[in-house]
Structure formats: structure tokens, C-alpha cells
Amino acid sequence: MGQGQQEKVATSLAGAISEEISASLAPVDAELERRYPGDPGTRQPVHTVYVPGDVFAADTIRSWGDRALAALDEHAPDAASFAAVLGLSDVLAEPVHARVRAKLEREPIEDLRVDFEDGYGPRPDAEEDETAARAARLIAEAYDKGTAAPYMGIRMKCMEAPVRDRGIRTLDIFLTGLMEAGGLPEGLVLTLPKVTYAEQVTAMVRLLEAFEKAHGLDAGRIGFEIQIETSQSILATDGTATVARMIQAAEGRATGLHYGTFDYSACLGVSAAYQASDHPAADHAKAIMQVAAAGTGVRVSDGSTNVLPVGPTAQVHDAWRLHYGLTRRALSRAYYQGWDMHPGHIPTRYAAVFAFYREGFEQAAARLARYANRAGGDVMDEPATAKALSGYLLRGLDCGALDIAEVARATGLTRMDLEGFAAPRRGDLTASAK
């Protein structure tokens, strides 16, 4: 065939065949869209801080930042000493240290949960009523004054019979208080703990539906996180993955799955000395959670460590190294969020997060730039990889590890471009980059 001569194209199937197949798969297409809408594209906080209801105060966020800065000043007063504790490279030492300090001054907590469950415990009804109303008032005031964390809310008591009514009442008081103070903030997050059966998730959905109807809110306005703290929430008696059913039972309201390190470990009989987020039982549970949540728009959060960075400097350094290592381990496994239980944890939370994004920044930016420009290189990336690279850069931007100017210089892309690669339309992952 001569150069430039057009190939003859022939087919054997009638067009009706394609139409019939499309019609037969229409219910599947709709089911895919409903069950697997993809990541919401919103910011995911790098941690959640839990503060008991009776301890939460108007200055809690600033107090945590100040206490974290004081810990740095006392136990690692400069970049070199902080890097030596954590094993940071010379290249990362100064930028990570500087960004950690800036973060603690500007935004020490990304997500705060006022706790009415284990951290608060059983109290007289009148006391918990007042504490819930106070939490609503303080959170509403924080959003009004611009001093709130990006995400704030409460962890209520669970849906088990002994505490169910108390949990429902606390949630009602809290949400009603927010409505009376001007409405629900955009950063509102609720956590439902100790979920064992999907029916408990359904009950939470019905509860939130009733509240929305009572206040004329849009259906589905209020979402919630599901806390995974029992073996039954991972594996049901029939051998199926309970957590997958929980996500569907939430009817689109589930925003996250949070692993409860110590309750889950204790449920399996793990000795107290070995209850940790890197225990094999923890890895198994989080792997199931991760697969169940993939593509649904529900995000997975790691748990916490109970080893606090307090006491003499050597003891603080040991706790910092442990927390830093656990956080880096979680990030490498795509658990981009975890719990922090003490102000001394947040310097190493941010150090681990910032180091994770900064040390991989140049390679990720270069790969994405080549992909976007359809240029060659030593790695042949596909749309799915471009999605992961963009998501990596966006998470780095959201937490403060990266600046938009340096990302733009390295990639030639705007944030809107990154968001387009990170959240492609269904089907684009098998298509060529435009």
C-alpha cells in the first residue's frame, strides 16, 4: 500500500448490537456512578485531634500550637537538632523545620473532634447536655472569628443500647446549637464510634435525615465518619466484609473510615504492650478498609500512638522518632490521615508529612510535566499514574508542604490543571492525555 493511502475499514457487526449491549449495561453504568463516584476532590486533613468535651475551650487550637512550639524550643531548638532526632537529610532539614514552625504558628490543627465518647466517658445527663451546648457555641464562635480549624465537630457516643439515647441527645443538642448560632459550618465533621453492624450506620442516616427535615436543610447535607474499632466491623459472621456494607448503608453520607488502634487491638486479644498501628492485625484491618473504600469517595484514616512525647529530652526524642516513623509508614501505604493525641505529637506529624511530600516533589513534578506535555522519559506513565501524581502534589499543597509557585514552576501547571488530572471523568483513565 502506497504512502498516504487510506486503510480500508471493515466491520461485521450491525450497529444495533452495540445499542443492545449499551442498553443491557445501563443499570450497571448507573450502579457504578452511584457506588463509585470517586474521590470528592476536597481537602483531606493530615490528622484528627481528639479533645475531651470538658477540656475543649475557646483557646484549645492556639494552646496546642503554643505547646507544640514550646516542645520544639525545649527539645529541638533548631533545624539541625530536629533533623538529627528524626534522621532528616541535610537537604530537607531547613525547609521541613521552617515549615513545621510556620504551620504551628498559622494552623496547628487541621481537624479537631470534641470527644463525648471514650475521652469523655459517662457523665450526669445535665452535665453532658451543657457540655454539648457549649461545644456548639465555641465552634460556631471560632468559625465566625476565623480561628477555627478547617474541620471541626464531635465524636458522639455509639449506637449500642446502653449509650444510644445519650449519644443521640448529645448530637441533637450540638447540631441544634450550631443551627441557632447561624447554621452548620462547611467544615463540620461528625464521628460515629464503635460501629459493628451496618444497621447502626443506617440508624445514623435516619437520625440525620430527621434533623435535616426538622430544619429544612438539603437532604444529605450532614455526613459522618465511621470508626472501625471491632473485628466484626471488618469481617461478618458470614465471611463478608462488613465495612463494605457499612459504606453502602451510609447512603452517600460516609466521609471517612477511621481505624481505632486500641479498641480494635483489644478486641482481637492483642496484649497491651503490642497494641500499635503497625501491628499485623492493624495492617490487615486497614487493608480491608482501604479496598472497601476505594472509589467510593470515602477516605481512610490511620489511628494513633499512645506513647506521649513528655518527660526528659531523651524520652521525648524516642517518642518523636516512634511517631515520625509510624506516620511515614502510614503515608507510604496511602493512609494520609491519622490521629494525634497530644500537642507534642503535632511537630512530628507535620515533619513526617512535609518530608514525605518534599522529598518526592521534584520527581513527581517532572513526571507529571512530561505526561502533560506528552514528552518522553525513563518512565512511561498512564492516566492513572497522572491521577496519582496530581493527587500527591495537591495533598502537598493543601497541608503546606509545597507552595503553588514552586509547583507551577516545576510542572507548568495551574492548580486547576492538577485538579483536572486528579479527578478525571470516568473513562478518561483509559484514554490518552489531552
Image (spheres, helix red, strand yellow):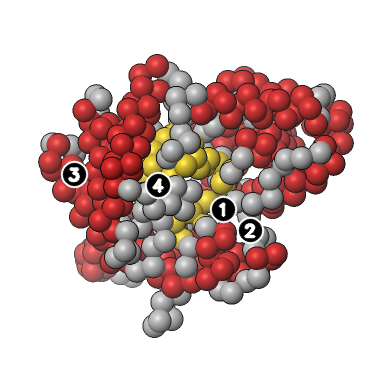
Residue 73 on image: x %, y %: 77, 24
* Label 1 to label 4: alpha-carbon separation: 20 Å
* Label 1 to label 2: alpha-carbon separation: 7 Å
Q: Above or below — where is 9 with respect to 324?
A: below
| Sequence-first disc among 2 and 3 | 3
| Sequence-first disc among 1 and 2 | 2
> What residue occupies the far bottom of the structure in this picture?
238
Which amino acid, by three-letter code, is at mark 4? Phe
Q: Are marks 3 and 4 in contact (CB under 8 Å)?
A: no
Residue 174 seen by the camera: yes
Disc 2: which residue: 277
Query: Residue 302 — which label?
Result: 1
| Sequence-first disc among 2 and 4 | 4
The residue shown at (57%, 47%) is 338
- Element under label 4? loop
Query: Residue 95 — which label?
Result: none
Q: Are marks 2 and 4 in contact (CB under 8 Å)?
A: no
Q: Are marks 1 and 2 in contact (CB under 8 Å)?
A: yes
Residue 224 on image: x %, y %: 35, 48
* Label 2 to label 4: alpha-carbon separation: 23 Å
- Element under label 1? loop
Residue 82 on image: x %, y %: 81, 32
The residue shown at (69%, 50%) is 307
* Label 2 to label 3: alpha-carbon separation: 35 Å
Which amino acid, by three-letter code, is at mark 1? Asp
Disc 3: which residue: 211
| Sequence-first disc among 3 and 4 | 4
Q: Above or below — where is 272 with respect to 103?
A: below
Is residue 324 left or right of 252 when viewed as pictured? right
Which amino acid, by three-letter code, is at mark 3? Phe
